[in-house]
Image: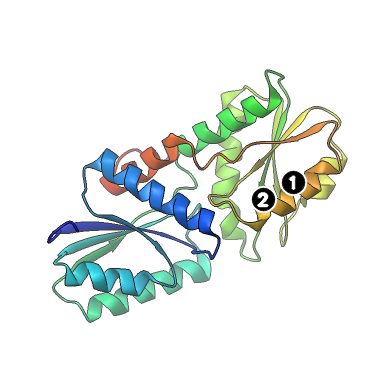
Amino acid sequence: MHGRPERAVVVVGHGSRVPAVRSDLAELARAVSAITGIPVVEPSGQAELTETLDRLAGQGASEILVQPYFLGLVGALAARLRERLQRWADHHPGVRISLGEPLGDHPLVTAAICESALHCLAGRKGTVVLVGHGSPDPAWSLSLHAQVSRLERLGVFERVIAAFLAHQAPGLEETLDVLEEEVAVVPFFLSRGLHTSVELPERVDRHRERLHLARFWADDPRIALAVAERISGGPSVT
């Protein structure tokens, strides 16, 4: 136990029953605590967020920052999270609670994606396809397009293209079908879930000779640094 923390941070992700996802978030929280010097940095899924906040308040926390472990925070998810925190705050007037910014447009995310793609291409100046899930709400793709633009400005790849698994265009298959050069397919996901572990390997395997699936980049140490900078109010979009 950490005694009675005055300040605490909750790193909140989507939540998952997959053990690897939970352990990844817990490891991230430990790394962020070490970087920031904040003793209490708790991982939490959305389902147990209220329970986590109640526990920290019961331990004496007077200030809690909820830091989203999301690439984007828009639409219904953002509205639900803000409403939930406001309801909690209304019942805990002695605790100051705030909501941090998501990670999707952070420069250190760019660096981690770039290194993953370069390693995948093994020195060849190929094309990068940055693939996200996609959403009926186009605002969800803003951070992905921001990363595409920043990767293009680096000038280390022939092309950088956005693609989506569902809901938005262009779709992944139609994008891959017209590419003839060496391609690194980079998942735009923070968690090791079904999309990164099963769906993307299956889709990319159909074009295996010229397409290469980049490694999962969200375990790069720079991601913990990005979270720490968000918590500390450090560098954002450049």
Along the viewing direction, whichever of 51 and 89 lies nearer the viewer:
51
The residue singled out by tag 1 in the image is: 201
Residue 43 appears left or right of 9: right
Q: Position of residue 38 (x, y in %)?
A: 21, 48
| Res. 129 in view | yes
Quarter of the image where the C terminus is located = top left
Q: Which residue is located at x 47 percent, y 57 percent?
A: 22
The disc labelled 1 sits on which kind of residue?
Pro
Q: Position of residue 13 (x, y in %)?
A: 45, 60
Q: Which residue is located at x 45 percent, y 67 percent?
A: 78
Residue 40 appears left or right of 46: left
Q: Quadrant of residue 51?
A: bottom left
Along the viewing direction, whichever of 169 and 229 lies nearer the viewer:
229
Check residue 170 in the rendering and tell me which mark sits there, or answer none: none
How busy is the neighbourhood of tag 2: few (under 14 within 10 Å), some, or many (20 plus)?
Answer: few
Check residue 197 in the rendering and tell me which mark sits there, or answer none: 2
Q: Position of residue 189 (x, y in %)?
A: 58, 49
Q: Which residue is located at x 76 percent, y 32 percent?
A: 183
| CB-based contact (under 8 Å), mark 2 and mark 1 | yes
User: Circle 2 sits in a helix, a strand or a loop, which is it?
Assistant: helix
| Res. 236 in view | no
User: Circle 1 sits in a helix, a strand or a loop, which is it?
Assistant: helix
Quarter of the image where the N terminus is located = bottom left
Compared to residue 45, the image places residue 25 above or below, namely above
Q: Which residue is located at x 21 percent, y 42 percent?
A: 37
Q: CA distance from mark 2 to mark 1?
A: 7 Å
The disc labelled 2 sits on which kind of residue?
Ser
Compared to residue 119, the image places residue 132 above or below, namely below
